[in-house]
Amino acid sequence: MKQLLQNLRNGELSLLEVPVPARPAGMILVATRASLISAGTERATVQAAQASLLGKARQRPDQVRKIFDNVKKEGLAATFAKVRDKLDQPKALGYSSAGVVLEADAGERVRAGDRVACGGAEYATHAEVVVVPRNLVAPIPGNLSFEEAAFATVGAIALQGVRRAEVGFGSRVLVIGLGLLGQITWQLLEDAGCEVIGADISAEMVDLAAQLGLARALVRGRDDVEGACAAATDGHGVDAVIITAAAKSRDPIELAGAVARERGRVVVVGAVPMEVPREPFYRKELDVVISRSYGPGRYDPEYEEGGVDYPYAHARWTEGRNLAAVLEAIARGRVRVRPLITHRFPLEQAERAYAIVSGADRQPHVGIVLTYSETPALAPQVALRTLPAQPAAGRVGIAFVGAGSFARSHLLPHLKGRTDAELVTVATARGYTAADVARKFGFAEAASDAQRALADERVQAVFIATRHDEHARLVQAALAAGKHVFVEKPLAVTSAELGALLPAAARCGRVLQVGFNRRFSPLAVALRQALAGAAAPVQVTYRVNAGPLPADHWLLDPRAGGGRMIGEGCHFLDLIQFLTGESPARVTAAAFGDDATGASTVLLEMSGGSVGVLVYQANASPRVPKERVEAFAGGRGGVLHDWRSVDLLEGRRARTLKASGQAKGFAEEIAAFFASLRTGTPAIPLESLAYTTAATFAVRQSIAERRAVEVTLPPG
C-alpha cells in the first residue's frame, strides 16, 4: 500500500510503498477513501520539519534543554547520534480520515464493510490502509460522503472548543480566526443557538464565512471588531471568545481581553502565544481555558490505545462521542463542510497538496482533501531486493522484529555491513517504520506481520526489540520455529511468562541471548578480570541516576513495560551477577513510592557469599553522571566511571583504562551473539538469564511486602 511520510530532518515528503499495518486486538483496520489535510496543524508540522537545526531549536527550547542534559550524561558524540537518528525517522502525516472497515474484532460496534470516520495522529494518517483504536472511529450516517466524513476529527476539535466555552442558547460569542477550524466552530455555535461574531485578518476567509451565512463577519484591521462586539451586547462584552487562529502575535489574546464581558470566558483552541495581559483579564476576572484537541480521552493511553471507554454518565462527551456528534451535525445540514473544500488531489499527488499548505505554491485554500483508490494493495510485506532461498555459506539469515529508537541507534548499526549476516526481513506493527528501517539498514524485505518473519525459512536468527510485554511470547514463538534469538531486555515481565519460557529454551537446542550489553563492555570485562584473582567474596556498589519519567510513559505501565526495575533494573542486576560470578539468592529492597516510579535501593545477597547494592535514583540532579560501579574483593577491584573509564586497583597499585566515548558494550554483545551461533555455546548461560529476571520479580515483591525475598526460579 502507499503512505505519505515526512523526513523530520529535512522536511522532505515521500509517497512510499509500505506493508499494510498489523491489526492488534481492539483495533479497526480501515481502507481509506478520503483524508483531510488540516491546513493549520499540518502546515506547522511541515514547516517545523523543513526548518534548519537552529530553527528547530528555536521552536522547541524544551528539547534543547534535554539535549544539553544528555550531552552531560552520554557525551557529545552519543547525543549527536541519538538526535540524528530521531530526526531521520519518518513521520506519518494526517489525523482526520474516512473509509471502509476491512477487519474488526467480533463484538465491535463496527464490522467489515461499514463506513467509518477515523481520528488520531499516527492512526488516521494519509495512507491507503490505517489501523485505528476502537474509540477513535465512528460510523458514518448513510447520506454522508467520505469527503464530508473526513472532516469529523477537525470538527471534533472545534466542538470541544465550543464545549469548553460553556455557552448556550442566546450566548454571544466572538470567534477569532475563520480558517478551517473557525468556519466549523461558528456553525456549531449558531446550531446551538448562540449569536456569533467572526473575525479574521483575511478578507477571503471573512467573505467565505459570509457566503455560508455568518451575518457578522469582520476583517481584523479593517473593521471595528471591538465596536461590533460592544454594539451587539449593549456594551457589556461577549460571553465567550473562542480563539481558533494560528498566530505568532499576541493580538488574538489581547483582542479577547478587550471584548469579553466581566467574568467571561476565553477559550484557546488555536496555536497562539499565551502571553496574557494581566490588567484587562484581572480587572474583568476572565477565565482563560485551553481546549485540548478532540475531547476527553486525548493523550490517555488507556482510552486511545487500550480501547477503554469512559463511563457514559461520568464523561458524556469523549473523543469518540464528539466524532459521532459532528458527523450527525454534518449529516443533518447543521454544519456544512462541502463548501470548505477548495482542493482535491489523489494520494499520488499529495506533494502538490502540501506545496499549497506549506506556502510554496501560494493558492488560497481552506480544506484540502486527498482521495484514494478503492482497491489498495493489502500485502503485509514489501520486497526491496531479491534473496536466495538460503543464505550463502558462512552467513546467517536475520529477521528483526520491532525497530524503535533504541534498536535503530544501538542495535541495527552493528548489524549493517556484517559479512556473516544476511539481513532478510524487518517487521514492525506500523509497517511504514519497517520499510524505512529496511531501506536504511539494508534488509531485503519489510513486513508488519512478525509471525511471517519468524516462520521464514531463510531466517536462522531473530532479533526481538518490541515493547516488553511481547518479549516472552515472541521468544517462545521464535524458538519453537527453530530460530536462534537475541531479545532486548527484559526476558519476561511476569513470573508466569518466565516459567513457561525456560523449559522451551532449555530443550530447543538454540542460542538465546538477552541484551544485557554492559557485561560485554571492555571496561566491565577488565573489572571482572581484576576481581578474579581474589580468593574472597566480592562487594559491588552500583549507583544509577536513571532520572524521572513522565507519568504516562509506557515503561511505567506494569503490563506493557513491567515497571522500572523489571524493564530497566535488570541491566544492573545482571552486571552485579557478572562481576561476582554468582547467582542472586536473596533480595531486600526499599523504594520511595513504588518500584515503577520512584527511586529504590536493592541489597542482593549472592549464592557464594558476595553482596551487591544497587542504588537506583530517579530523583537526582541531571548533572550527576548516570552510572558508577565500585567492585572490590580481597584488596583488588576497581571503580567504573559512567562507562568512560575504569580505575583498576590492587593494593596500592593503580592503572586506568579509558574508552573512546561511552563503552556500554553494544557492539561487543552483537559480536558475542554471532560468535555463539558459530560455537553453539550461549554468551550468557540460560541459568544466569533466568536468575537475573527472577531477581527483578523478587525486588518488586520485596518492596511490596517490606521483607527479604528468596530468589527462586518459577516452576515450569
Image (tube, rainbow, N blue to C red):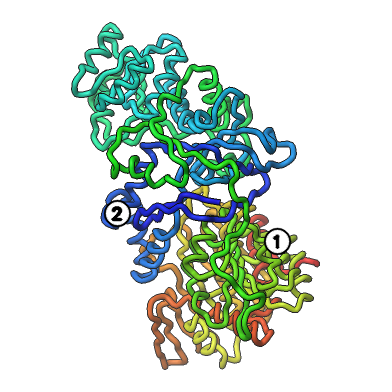
Q: Secondary structure at mark 1?
A: helix
Element class at badge 2 = helix
Image coordinates for residue 473, horizontal then vertical, percent: 70, 61
Image-based side of 295 in relation to 513, left or right: left
x and y, in percent, of residue 271 in the image:
34, 36
Identify the disc placed on residue 57: 2
Seen in the image, is 501 located left or right of residue 555?
A: right
Left or right side of 571 for 71: left
Judge whether 313 appears above or below 662 on screen.
above
Task: Specify whether residue 644 is in view.
Answer: yes
- For residue 31, which quarter of the picture? top right
In percent of the image, x 38 and y 80: which residue is there? 660
Disc 1: CA contacts within 10 A as few (<14), some (14-19) or many (>=20) = some
Q: If the image is split into quadrants, where does the C terminus sit?
A: bottom right
Pick the front one: 691 or 212: 212
**Camera-nearest residue between 595 and 645:** 645
As drawn, the label of residue 473 is 1
